[in-house]
């Protein structure tokens, strides 16, 4: 199998290229800098067709598209919002253009997406049948997924990877949470009733590999564990794992003042279930938050 991966230097992309390579899959990493070693191909997400020769896409079995600027890395100024959109929508448009122009287009596009599609679901559990929600992120994800539609029109199977928060000690949310908790400064955020939809890095990688071989699946697929947790439950689980107290609470108003609009990421609720993965027979290594945190904190989740 021959697979190309964008965003290959990020948390998921780095682990995925290693994971697939260990499964005897030939992986090509699409990089924005000049290609410096075997298995790399330079592309420019801002250029028409990604600056790619369509011949480079010809004959691939799949493309896994993971490019995108970090959603919660900075305050959401208007400039930052434009960067978030361009890094996802423009890059997807460019990549799909190159894929569709190939003499033998790739058979599959696994396109990065997010549970932000659903907006704030409160305590209501949702699966892939739920409609698009409201807010900046919901609109961003809607347009991000729409940018991949020309691939489907060209006969390419398209799967939208609606990922939850990926738990790994290598990056993302977990390392930032562990520091205050280790010092006994762990805190519930706001009311603590808001849901977090999460998945370990291990299960995310396994799900991507699973989807590579499931030709009957297309459209949105939630990459989340089957048991989303409230912020209060997550706080309790982290405190128990580290044997530290977690009696503090960060008021919602303080968070909004400190982070601005991006605070909606922490205060919003996303109770998203992986219905299509489970219906297809996928089994999670870490379906519950306690064992998942232990594995992630010990850096075992990329095995």
Image: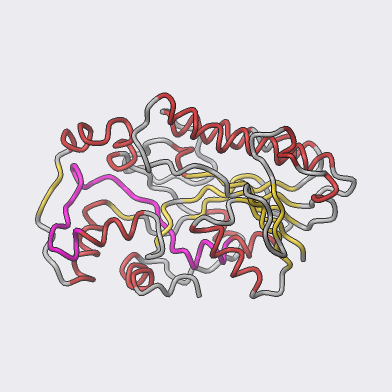
**Picture residue at 63% right of the left edge, 64% below the top:** 210
28 in magenta: no
Left or right, 25 with reference to 176: right
Q: How many marks?
A: 0
- Find residue 106 and report its horizontal and vertical position in percent: 79, 51
**Picture residue at 26% right of the left edge, 36% below the top:** 259
The quarter of the displayed image where residue 167 is located: bottom left
Query: Can you name the residue that lies furthest to the top here?
Result: 78
The quarter of the displayed image where residue 288 is located: bottom left
- Find residue 85 and report its horizontal and vertical position in percent: 52, 32
Task: Identify which residue, 270 or 16, lies in the foreground.
Answer: 16
> Magenta region: which residues?
180-207
Instruction: Name the image quarter holding the N terminus.
Output: bottom right
The quarter of the displayed image where residue 145 is located: top right
Task: Identify which residue, 80 or 2, lies in the foreground.
Answer: 80
202 in magenta: yes
Left or right, 59 with reference to 72: right
Left or right, 268 with reference to 278: left
**Picture residue at 37% right of the left edge, 65% below the top:** 169
| Residue 249 to residue 82: above or below | below
Colour treatment of the image: secondary structure
């Amino acid at each position: 199998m021959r697979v190309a991966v964008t965003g290959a230097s990020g948390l998921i992309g780095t682990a995925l290229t290693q994971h697939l390579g260990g499964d005897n899959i030939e992986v090509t990493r699409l990089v924005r800098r000049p290609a410096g070693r075997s298995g790399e191909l330079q592309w420019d997400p801002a250029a028409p067709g990604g600056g790619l020769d369509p011949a480079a896409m010809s004959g691939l079995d799949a493309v896994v598209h993971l490019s995108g600027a970090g959603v919660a890395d900075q305050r959401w100024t208007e400039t930052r919002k434009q960067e978030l959109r361009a890094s996802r929508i423009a890059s997807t448009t460019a990549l799909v253009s190159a894929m569709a122009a190939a003499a033998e287009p790739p058979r599959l596009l696994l396109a990065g997406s997010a549970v932000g599609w659903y907006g704030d679901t409160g305590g209501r559990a949702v699966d892939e049948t739920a409609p698009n929600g409201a807010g900046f992120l919901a609109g961003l994800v809607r347009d991000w997924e729409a940018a991949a539609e020309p691939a489907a029109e060209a006969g390419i199977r398209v799967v939208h990877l609606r990922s939850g928060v990926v738990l790994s000690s290598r990056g993302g949310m977990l390392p930032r949470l562990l520091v205050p908790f280790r010092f006994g400064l762990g805190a519930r955020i706001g009311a603590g009733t808001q849901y977090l939809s999460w998945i370990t890095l291990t299960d995310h990688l396994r799900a991507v590999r699973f989807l590579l071989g499931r030709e009957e699946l297309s459209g949105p697929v939630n990459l989340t564990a089957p048991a989303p947790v409230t912020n209060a439950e997550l706080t309790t689980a982290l405190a128990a794992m580290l044997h530290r107290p977690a009696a503090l609470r960060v008021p919602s108003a303080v968070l909004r003042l400190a982070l601005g609009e991006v605070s909606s990421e922490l205060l919003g609720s996303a109770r998203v279930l992986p219905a299509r993965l489970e219906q297809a027979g996928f089994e999670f290594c870490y379906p519950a938050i306690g064992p998942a945190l232990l594995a992630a904190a010990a850096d075992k989740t990329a095995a």
